[in-house]
Amino acid sequence: MPLSRRQFLLAASIAPFSAGLATSANATTTHEVSIEGFAFSPASLSIAAGDTVTFTNNDAAPHTATAQSAGLDTGTLNSGDSESLTFNTPGTFAYRCRFHPAMRGTVTVT
């Protein structure tokens, strides 16, 4: 179920305070990327291998987050839709919106 804008903003405001609460050495984290104003925010993200990135479209127009390599793709996200991708392999993954190629971002996995 997609998050409402209010739920997303609440989760984003709580995330920095809860990041240090993981107790397992193998704990994974979910990171949020908002699509708004025809841009990815944040446009650059550094994560650990095994972490998940949730892309949420807060624009009226449809968007995608499609990796230029590695075959990672959210598919079409209509307004309010979210899709999560898990990054298991270290590297830097450049992605863009298939509909709006000027929209670009990167995920760096360590």
Image (spheres, helix red, strand yellow):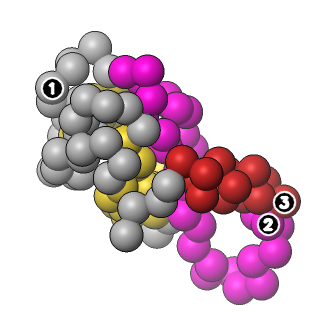
The residue carrying mark 3 is 17
- Which of disc 3 and disc 1 is earlier in sequence? 3
Q: Is 91 in front, or is 23? A: 23
Residue denoted by label 2? 18
Which amino acid does the dot numbered 3 rest on?
Phe
Report x, y in % for residue 20.
Answer: 82, 67
Residue 35 highlighted magenta (yes or no): yes
Asked if residue 19 lies left or right of residue 58, the reply is right
Earlier in the chain: of badge 2 and badge 1, it is 2
Q: Amino acid at mark 1?
A: Phe
Q: Residues within 10 Å of mark 1 (few under 14, many from 20)?
A: few
| Quadrant in which residue 2 is drawn | bottom left
Looking at the image, the residue that sits furthest to the bottom is: 24
Magenta region includes residue 65: no
Q: Which mark identifies residue 99?
A: 1
Query: Which segment is the magenta one?
Result: 18-46
